[in-house]
Image (spheres, grey):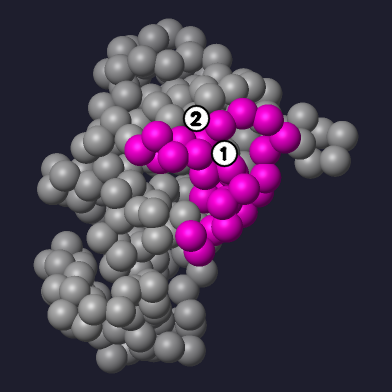
Amino acid sequence: MLEIKDLNVYYGAIHALKGISLTVQDGELVSLIGANGAGKTTSLHTISGLLTASSGEVLLDGQNLQKVPPHTIIRMGLAHVPEGRHVFASMTVEENLRMGAYIVRDQKKIAASLEQVYHHFPRLKERRRQLAGTLSGGEQQMLATGRALMTDPKIVLMDEPSMGLSPILVKEIFSIIQTLHESGITILLVEQNAKMALAVSDRAYVLETGTISMEGLASDLAADDRVRKAYLGA
């Protein structure tokens, strides 16, 4: 479904991504783990069209996304849950969700998507008339994820969903991610919490200073001494 080929990205003279390649197959949950500054968020921003690569390819179902504007990429079936959630604080939960479906014209499809989101996130249904800015951090993460699902995307990019959450809420968010995956949603997950990410993923890549240093089954990487020492606190 998603294929990244030899992607190079610069911030001025800084070579942020150095020829990275990765794939995400239909129905997979693939994690991209690494330390702060490794290039994880840059990778997602480039995939979703917010940054332009100097070379390489980003392919969604064989179509090259390079030089395609972000709003068109959304229409092609790629949704992005950004780091920091970025909900519309002065709008209600349901208004935020409907904003996620701004490219959809079929009202019946919007209503069906809304009910599907409420099925995944019953707490959002309970708070559908509440202002998004009054939600807890965990609820805002649910809202940001639900908003991304409103277009019925082929693949969802999730950027640091556990950031700033308490340990209890981190477990809840990862339980939700696992449930979404089990329902058939394809996910590329960027996460600094390597232990939790590897626990729910099918496969994973390790990104170090702009380079993919390791890749494989998530269970194999979780058992690898190098990953355990560098990212799992072992």
Above or below residue 40? Residue 100 is below
Determine the residue positioned at 43% across, 59% down.
74
Residue 141 seen anywhere in this rendered image of the structure: no
- For the point 41% across and 48% down, the residue is 157
Q: How many marks?
A: 2
Residue 19 x/y as whole percent: 63, 22
- For the residue carrying disc 2, how many other residues have a C-alpha within 10 Å: few (<14), some (14-19), or many (20+)? some
Q: Residue furthest right?
A: 13
Residue denoted by label 2: 4
Question: Does the residue at mark 1 contact the one at mark 2 (Cβ under 8 Å)?
Answer: yes
Please give the range of residues in magenta: 45-72
Left/right placement of residue 163 relative to residue 26 reads right
Q: CA distance from mark 1 to mark 2?
A: 10 Å
SS category of the residue bearing label 1: helix
Q: Three-letter amino acid code at disc 2?
A: Ile
The mark closer to the camera, 1 or 2, is 2
* Quadrant position of residue 91: bottom left
Asked whether 23 or 212 is in front, the reply is 23
Residue under label 1: 43
Q: Residue placed at 32% from the left, 74% from the top?
A: 104
Which one is earlier in the sequence, the residue at label 1 or at label 2?
2
In magenta segment, residue 67? yes
- For mark 2, give the secondary structure: strand
Instruction: Say whether residue 42 is left or right of residue 124.
Output: right
On residue 56, the disc is: none
**Residue 149 left/right relative to 71:** left
